[in-house]
Image (cartoon, grey):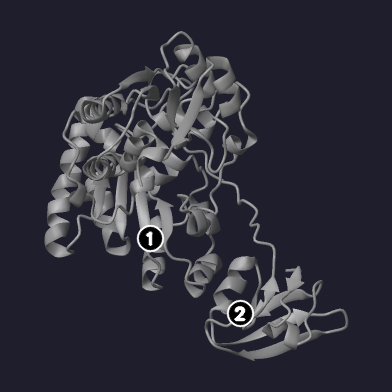
Amino acid sequence: MRILAVTENGIANELGIVAGDELLAFDGFPVIDVLDYDFYNSRERFVMRVKTADEIVDYDIEKDDDEDIGMELTREIPVRSCRNHCLFCFVDQLPPEELRDTLHVKDDDYRHSFIFGNYVTLTNVSAKELERIVRLKLSPLYVSVHTSDAELRKKMLGLTDASAVPDIVEQLKTLHAGGIAVHAQVVWCPRINDDLDETIADIAPYTQSLAVVPVGLTKNGNPALFRVDKSGAQRVIDTVEKWQERFLQTRGTRYVFAADELYLKAERAIPSYEAYENFSQIENGIGLIASFCHDFDEALARYDMGNVGEVSIATGESAYPLIRKCARIVTEKYGGTVHVYKIRNDFFGDTVTVAGLIVGKDLCAQLRDKRLGERLLLPHVMLREAGDVFLDGCTVAQLEKELNVKIQILPADGESFVAGLIGENNHE
């Protein structure tokens, strides 16, 4: 890797290394990306190989573990594209309309799993790369398992060459033996991977937690897939809760968790806040409602004063009953008027009911003639990370202009919900 800069008083500067030199290896292992540097930068002893303008030099480094080598390298790690053709791939279900380019990227890169928490299948990871994961302690990782049955997994991932599909259980064993924590997921597709009992039993010894989430189908979904219905969701929850009881006795953790969406589909009560333990799978839609309600109740108890005025909220069909209930509780305590609007997903299809997949076009069409009040509150999950753009490319500013209302974007948690309704300047 090309060295972009050298810190003035760092170890590299003292050794005479300069910007433009090339970092080749640590302890004989070639430098692949910045993760190699980050790992060895936290070590006390290692050999660092650098190519200067004139020669290749091995430096025997001895330092404190918190002492910085003092190099600046590119932190960009190009995406390793997915080689699978999953039956349920959401990217393949995207509508033909113009969308952001990033939505078409199929990221199946174990490095991004470590850095960002992305779920990967490990089908493109070699034995040598598994060794690198263990050596660099890239933990935790997030792995899409779906099923532990090798033939069924090959079918679900759309891979025809059996020899090219690594055994996921063996991969998990290797990672576990190397001290790598793995959080796993199963995307449950009715009538396809109904072997949930077997999968849980096979992978539980080698993983930290397991999320079971329902397949998401848009109007462009694979016609070979079946929708998740009430009775199916109930069966999955029964299986999950059966295993939770066993694991509480044997491991002291529930280990496996069902997505909030499955409880909504099953028309079952959401488990308690405590039942989600450390919320290790919350980014996967596991425990979002319990966490929201917990934070909402705490915020209500903490904020004595507030002024709601007249505002509006737009959300998805799944969250609508909860948001409407919480809005009513807020107005009962603080006064004011909150209009809660349920947005139908015409863009992806009516089978998609989550707020995070609502686009600007649907918001505009369905709210244009509605009473919106002084502000329209929207959850941040509707927008791309650290941005103001909806999935269809519409910006917040454009939507404000179309609807002629001030839009306030809120984090999707209970405290932000209360604080946003009563006004940012009315609480500490």
Q: Is residue 334 left or right of residue 183?
A: left
Residue 134 or residue 377, whichever sits in front? 377
Q: In the picture, residue 10 is in which quadrant?
A: bottom right
Q: How many marks?
A: 2
Q: Is residue 328 above or below residue 172?
A: above
Q: Secondary structure at mark 2?
A: loop
Q: Is residue 196 above or below residue 350?
A: below
Q: Are marks 2 and 1 in contact (CB under 8 Å)?
A: no
Amino acid found under the numbered disc labelled 1:
Val
Q: Residue furthest right?
A: 54
Q: Measured from the top left, where is residue 93 in percent x and y?
A: 50, 28
Q: Measured from the top left, where is residue 147 in percent x and y?
A: 34, 47
Q: Residue furthest top?
A: 369
Viewer can see residue 370: yes
Which residue was labeled with disc 1? 182
Which residue was labeled with disc 2? 68
Viewer can see residue 394: no
Residue 304: mark in rendering = none
Distance Cα–Cα, label 2 vs label 1: 29 Å
Q: Measured from the top left, where is residue 44 in percent x and y?
A: 54, 87
Amino acid found under the numbered disc labelled 2:
Asp
Comes first in the chain, label 2 or label 1: 2
Q: Secondary structure at mark 1?
A: strand
Q: How crowded is the residue under tag 1: few (<14 C-alpha within 10 Å), some, or many (20+)?
A: many
Q: Is residue 45 left or right of residue 217?
A: right
Q: Measured from the top left, where is residue 286 in percent x and y?
A: 30, 44
Q: Residue at x 20, y 55 (%)?
A: 254
Q: Is residue 59 above or below residue 312?
A: below
Q: In the picture, residue 389 is in which quadrant?
A: top right
